[in-house]
Amino acid sequence: MNTRNEYTATAKILHWLMAILIILQLLTAYLFLAFDNETLKPYAGILYFLHFNIGFSILLLFILRVCWRLTHKIPPYPPSLHPKEITIANLGHIVIYVLIGTLVLTGILRYNIHSGAFHYFNFITIPAIITTHNQILYSIIAVTHNLSGDLLLAIIAIHIAMAIRHQIIDKNNILQRMVPRALHKFLRN
């Protein structure tokens, strides 16, 4: 049980690893839009390879993170937070988890329909969940995947903005719950 007013080291590591990978993942996804540019076309294969493998890495971390979250209590919120703010924060976290899960699942299904089994870093073969080549199903999954990515980007922006607001405007040191302890001295008000 966590008696401190911060997340466990494991929760922090999972959070920041996923944050870095999700940012890289969204960056690779938005770079796909640049493939019409002749200069970038030669790099399409590498970009797709990174996108698929980062996505599967996010899945593995996501499973670990959900298991960790279900078996460990979160630290208490600062007493200065209004109950409505806590409710909104909790709902925001649920939305983030749902969007990450949706993105990963639709990404895998999209890959399976298009390419079949997945070869994680060309080392481990992950069998296809779905083997149909139905174009309508593929289109629905692709749109859901892309829309989930856009929504996740928007929610992450709100998540970051609220964390900064709580730290700078409200001065309630809420960032100390999730950052490594070595950074706490830089966050004190």
Image (cartoon, rainbow, N blue to C red):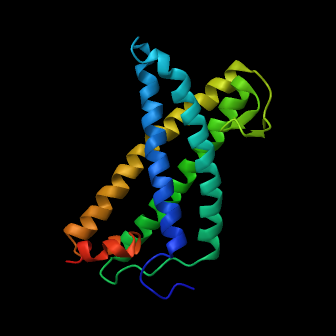
Looking at the image, the residue that sits furthest to the front is 123
Name the residue rendered at 32%, 64% in the picture.
163
Where, by quadrant of the figure, is residue 92 drawn?
bottom left
Looking at the image, the residue that sits furthest to the top is 38
Q: In which quarter of the image is the C terminus?
A: bottom left
Question: Does any portion of residue 172 appear in the rendered image?
Answer: no
In the image, taking residue 121 as reference, residue 149 lies left or right, namely left
Name the residue rendered at 31%, 75% in the picture.
184
Q: Quick check: 51 above or below 34? A: below
Q: Where is residue 83 in the image (x, y as percent from the top left)?
A: 38, 76
Q: Where is residue 146 in the image (x, y as percent from the top left)?
A: 51, 33
Question: Does any portion of residue 89 appear in the rendered image?
Answer: yes
Name the residue rendered at 35%, 81% in the picture.
78
Q: Where is residue 120 in the image (x, y as percent from the top left)?
A: 68, 39
Q: Quick check: 128 above or below 80? A: above
Q: Quick check: 92 above or below 71? A: above
In the image, taking residue 138 as reference, residue 160 lies left or right, namely left
Looking at the image, the residue that sits furthest to the bottom is 3
In the image, taking residue 6 as reference, residue 109 lies left or right, namely right
Count of numbered badges drawn on the protein: 0
